[in-house]
Amino acid sequence: MARSRYKGNKDLPANLYRDNGNAWRYRHPITGKYHSMGTDKNKAFQAARKLNSLLIQEDDLVVKVTGKIISFREFSEKYLSEKRRKDGRPIAENTKSNYQIHLNRLYRYWGEKSLDSITLKMVNDYLDELTASNSKSVRSLLCNIFDVAVSKGLCPDNPARITLRRYVPKQRKRHTLEGLDIIRRHSPLWMQNAIDLSMLTTQRRSDIVKLKWADIYDGYIHIAQQKTTDDPLDEFEIMEGAGYVRIKIDSELQKVLDRCKSDNVLSPFVIHQIPKRKTKNDNKEHWTQILPLYLSEEFLRIVKLSNAYPNLQGRQIPTFHEIRAFAIFLHKKSGKSAQALAGHSSVKMTEHYEAGHEIIWNDVDVGITLPFANVT
């Protein structure tokens, strides 16, 4: 519902506002942009009423037939609350939060509009106002929302899927051995352990920080991978779902695991730390747990502090996630099967898991030794 007007503006047509002095301006009900309407009050009123009749979708006929308008906000909120990954598990809280941020912005334009009144032009106009990376993210979200709406017979087609994808130029650079070695030497013990585990196992940030000692038995590290994406920076992402990888513990990996225990902190998590102060965090299972976002933020802070990449700025600076790409490169260079270590060996295996069968672990070996200087 549009916000209520001030008492002095009650007589104004919808979307018409007073500008500076005697001027008037019209707010486009779809794009939200303001357009000058001059100083003639009568002409401004007439133009505003005509524009409203052309641009605002009337829902009276829909109400007569269905008895209820399904707004974009209502449907999107329901979509987000029921959103699941392909393996049936809830989406990650961070992913859900990012979706909600995009939706909150969309609600300003389409919140109360009926779902089937949103047109291709409306979607295009909105996406064109965004940066290339944000446009790509929002388009993907809208494609999914309208796919569900079409499947339920609430929309005749999917206006978002007809739009063209924006090209997102790659800015982030890869890690180098020299740069990563500098970062590691400036890192606390827990970060060194996280870097080394990522290098040896090629696992994602989320899987590194959620690894527990209970996942290590029978000479293997058992990792039920939390998520895969279509990230073009990640060579071995196949499809959404869980990969089940069992990594054999060799002497190199055992040294890292032993070092993770050397601080004598009783934590269920392999990568952990004693925080500077204990605070209640509903997202934490244990007070020593390190959350993915904190890992990324601390890593970036250390990269800048260590001046590991003095010629890179902003988004060019490689993140913790890029360690995975660098590790995959080293595994491939050593002639080992990086894909098996990084995730699924085939789409068929993923389909087997989704069919409800028992888990079949994909057994793999670590293919490299840590290339850093003075590793103990």
Image (cartoon, grey):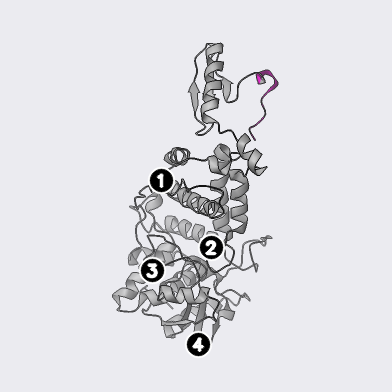
Name, please, the residue furthest toward the front.
65
In space, the residues marked 1 and 4 are separated at their CA atoms by 50 Å
Left or right of residue 314: residue 272? right
Q: Height in image: 374 above or below 237? A: below
Q: Check if mark 3's residue and mark 1's residue have beta carbons within 8 Å.
A: no
Q: Which residue is mark 4?
A: 219
Q: Residue 225: within the magenta?
A: no
Q: Which residues are magenta?
A: 1-9
Q: Residue 8: within the magenta?
A: yes
**Can residue 190 be seen by looking at this rendering?**
no
Please state which amino acid type lies under the numbered disc 1. Thr
Q: Point out the tag, 1 or 2, that comes first from the N-terminus.
A: 1
Q: Secondary structure at mark 1?
A: loop
Q: Secondary structure at mark 3?
A: loop
In space, the residues marked 3 and 1 are separated at their CA atoms by 27 Å
Please state which amino acid type lies under the numbered disc 2. Pro
Q: Check if mark 1's residue and mark 4's residue have beta carbons within 8 Å.
A: no
Labelled disc at residue 292: 2
Q: Check if mark 1's residue and mark 2's residue have beta carbons within 8 Å.
A: no
